[in-house]
Image (cartoon, rainbow, N blue to C red):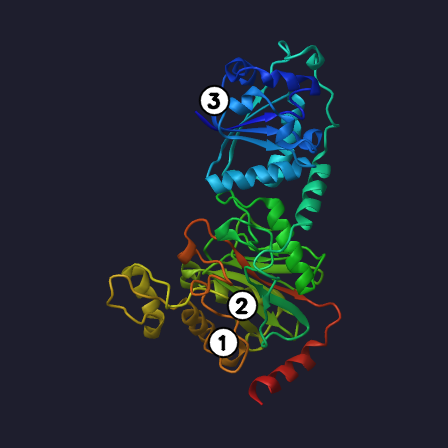
């Protein structure tokens, strides 16, 4: 049995087919491919927007327990409401009965509002055996939307949704000079409504239920709050290794764990949800970097690989580079298999407070600090949870469910926050700002 059956009454049937649903459901089955489902959805859109369920006093509603009417003003609103019901019921297998034209249009909406987590099968209603004469050769339907029209419609829909969990909140490091814009996002102020992704989730993937349109709106709201809208945001394509993309010298590889650049007009970002988003800023030559560092990337040296790219490609001095370590899982909540943990113990014994445990706790932030300092980064240029008397940018993500997403805490369906950074076009000169920063740090 199919989990969900959608009958497309916008593109699949004409308005004269309304009486068709007065028939017993057994008589309707041949026209919907003979499929029975646990839940049936009637996609009506604006055609029935004013009628509600009362517009369907039909036998199909009486004979089938779980029938849902999707009768909102736009297809986007109908399908997003449909998606929310699927998510609440933890369903993902969908069969849609429609016309050829309907399949073409609904596929565009599917790309915007759903991810590969959902399985869609389109059954095209046979036009050789129409339900009524008005359906031959095809019903009169709204004009087919282009991909651009669908994107604009979904974007407008998400923009009018209320913020969840409060306003957008951004953590900022006092170590990063004002000639750069930067921040670390939290989970509040977005539109994502699935509990573990609510609400400012900033990454959509084939394994999550949060669609690209929701993530795009969350990113827009972050950009407006942070002040970089409408500049493009380039997010690291995580590989859990140490590969660095030098923006401007080559096309981005398929995957990499850090970005470095001296370009203005772009925002670079690294994701995190227990893994560390690392931000690098060099105010003398105005070069920036962003890296994603999990436990694997930390052991492989992604932090110093980023520093190395800044030095090699742009002539930065290691002693001028400032690093901010963003929200990430603390040693209080993060454990590894003993063999893996002992690799961190080799970096420094304090990175593993309980090395004799069967599953020791590991401090990936401390390991990162130690590796950076060994590579030449000044101890006073690293902003992490050991810094006292400055705003905290490295809280434990697992300990604070109200503010942060966490893979350790939430499991596979976790959300993503980011650290982001850009070069301001009208900031103060690097040398002057470097001097001011040193006075602030050490004075």
- The one nearer the camera, 155 or 282, is 155
Residue, x 48% and y 35% (percent of image)?
92
Instruction: Say which label, 3 or 1, has the lower sequence index.
Output: 3
Instruction: Say which label, 2 or 1, has the lower sequence index.
Output: 2
Determine contact: label 3, label 1, CB under 8 Å: no
- Real-space Cα distance between discs 3 and 1? 67 Å
Q: With 60 as the anchor, is 386 left or right in this view?
A: left
User: Does residue 66 sit above or below 320 in this rendering?
Assistant: above
Residue 424 pos. (x, y %): 71, 68
Q: Quadrant of the N terminus?
A: top left
Q: Which mark is residue 307?
A: 2
Query: Callout 1: helix, strand or loop?
Result: loop
Residue at which label 3 appears:
36
Residue 341 pos. (x, y %): 32, 63
Q: Give the label, 2 or 3, closer to the camera.
A: 3
Q: Which mark is residue 376?
A: 1
Residue 439 pos. (x, y %): 61, 87
- Real-space Cα distance between discs 2 and 3? 59 Å
User: Does residue 343 sit above or below 74 in this rendering?
Assistant: below
Residue, x 75% and y 70% (percent of image)?
426
- Real-space Cα distance between discs 2 and 1? 10 Å
Determine contact: label 2, label 1, CB under 8 Å: yes
Q: With 101 as the anchor, is 441 left or right in this view?
A: left
């Amino acid at each position: 049995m199919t989990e969900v059956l959608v009958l497309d009454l916008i593109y699949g049937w004409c308005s004269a087919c309304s009486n068709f649903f007065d028939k017993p459901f057994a008589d309707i089955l041949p026209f919907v491919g003979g499929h029975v489902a646990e839940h049936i959805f009637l996609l009506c859109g604006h055609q029935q927007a004013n009628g509600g369920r009362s517009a369907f006093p039909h036998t199909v509603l009486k004979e089938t327990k779980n029938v849902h009417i999707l009768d909102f003003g736009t297809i986007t609103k109908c399908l997003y409401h449909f998606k929310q019901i699927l998510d609440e019921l933890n369903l993902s297998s969908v069969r849609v009965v429609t016309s050829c034209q309907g399949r073409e249009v609904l596929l565009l909406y599917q790309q915007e509002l759903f991810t590969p987590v959902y399985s869609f099968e389109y059954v095209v209603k046979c036009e050789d055996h129409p339900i009524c004469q008005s359906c031959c050769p095809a019903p009169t339907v709204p004009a087919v939307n282009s991909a651009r029209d669908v994107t604009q419609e979904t974007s407008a829909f998400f923009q009018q949704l209320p913020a969840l969990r409060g306003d957008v909140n951004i953590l900022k490091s006092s170590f990063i000079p004002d000639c750069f814009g930067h921040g670390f996002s939290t989970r509040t102020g977005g539109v994502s409504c699935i509990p573990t992704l609510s609400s400012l989730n900033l990454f959509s993937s084939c394994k999550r239920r949060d669609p690209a349109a929701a993530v795009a709106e969350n990113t827009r709201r972050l950009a407006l709050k942070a002040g970089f809208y409408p500049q493009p945001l380039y997010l690291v394509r995580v590989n859990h290794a140490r590969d660095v993309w030098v923006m401007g010298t080559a096309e981005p590889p398929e995957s990499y764990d850090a970005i470095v650049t001296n370009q203005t007009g772009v925002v670079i970002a690294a994701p995190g949800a227990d893994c560390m988003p690392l931000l690098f800023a060099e105010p003398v030559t105005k070069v920036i970097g962003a890296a994603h560092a999990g436990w694997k990337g930390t052991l492989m040296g992604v932090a110093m690989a980023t520093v190395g790219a800044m030095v090699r490609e742009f002539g930065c001095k290691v002693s001028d580079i400032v690093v901010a370590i963003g929200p990430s899982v603390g040693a209080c909540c993060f454990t590894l298999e003993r063999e893996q943990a002992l690799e961190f113990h080799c970096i420094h014994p304090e990175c593993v407070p309980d090395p004799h445990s069967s599953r020791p706790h590991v401090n990936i932030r401390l390991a990162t600090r130690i590796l950076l300092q060994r590579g030449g980064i000044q101890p006073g240029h690293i902003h992490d949870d050991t810094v006292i008397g400055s705003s905290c940018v490295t809280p434990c993500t697992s300990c604070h469910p109200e503010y942060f997403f966490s893979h350790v805490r939430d499991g596979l369906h976790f959300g993503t926050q980011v650290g982001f950074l850009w070069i301001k076009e009208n900031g103060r000169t690097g040398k002057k700002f470097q001097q001011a920063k040193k006075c602030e740090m050490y004075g």
